[in-house]
Image (cartoon, rainbow, N blue to C red):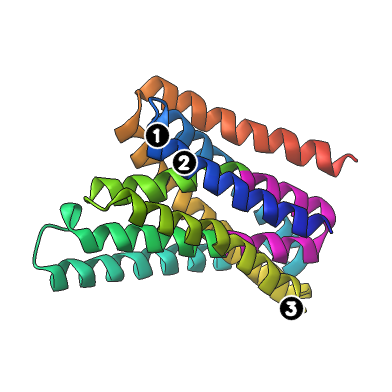
Amino acid sequence: MTVFAVVAATFVSTLVGGLVALRSTKQLGLIIALGAGVRIGAAFFDLAPESARAIGSLDDAMLFAGIGFLAFYLLERITLLHVGHEAGHPVERHEQVGALGAGGMSVHSFLDGVAVGASFHASVELGIIVATVVVLHDFSDGIATVSVLLANDATRATAFRWLLIDAGAPVIGAVVALFLTIEGPVLGAILGLFVGFFLYVGAAELLPEAHRKGRGDQVMAGTVAGAAFIFAVTRLVSGI
């Protein structure tokens, strides 16, 4: 029951974030920075230790984290290069790029849902922590989905349709993962892959975007605050 409440919260969080973006906000940089901080904090303070415990080896956990980081980087770069070549225009301003960006955010959201479902296989405590990260971050995901479309000349109706897809993606991901049997080293490997995924999205995607959208001091404060918040949550939940 807890998982279904969580996935409902992710849907609402993404939807609200997108609606905020459609109405525009002056604090996009700070919001995105908070999202980056909670992802990076979750990767270091919770997913990585849990992955190492499940696998029984810190070295193997870090290996899978590296694989996850590099695999997602390569997938994203190859996809962007393909679209840029097919479009025949600068990547930054082509309509197809907006759809690619929104589609990429939807894939992020689906994987977020899988992370939530897989984490609940490990323990309720880990599930709650990862769910907290996802719910908080999906607000900025909704903003990012709408922003990338509007920045590439998509209509508001198109942006809203993609927002609904992005909001539903983590629900599907969590349900899929929840009904799979995942345990032991396999679970540890999956969590390790998500360490790399969370670090890539947080550090390589969200932080540069936050610095483009907001003041440097606010972005730094937001990032540290987000990571510190997750650190406090992990300690609070583990002590319950």
Which mark is first along the chain, 3 or 1? 1
Q: Position of residue 146 (x, y in %)?
A: 38, 48
Number of residues whose C-alpha sits closer than 10 Å to that of mark 2, classed few (under 14), some (14–19) or many (20 or more): some
Looking at the rendering, which quadrant does residue 121 occupy? bottom right
Residue 151 position (above or below residue 187): above
Please say if the residues under marks 2 and 3 sit with CB atoms less than 8 Å apart. no
Q: Nearer the viewer, residue 202 or 8?
A: 8
Please say if the residues under marks 1 and 3 sit with CB atoms less than 8 Å apart. no
Q: Which residue is mark 1?
A: 23
Number of residues whose C-alpha sits closer than 10 Å to that of mark 3, classed few (under 14), some (14–19) or many (20 or more): few
Identify the amino acid type marked 1. Arg
Q: CA distance from mark 2 to mark 1?
A: 6 Å
Q: Which residues are magenta?
A: 111-135
Q: Is residue 231 left or right of residue 76?
A: right
Q: Is residue 160 magenta?
A: no
Q: CA distance from mark 1 to mark 3?
A: 39 Å
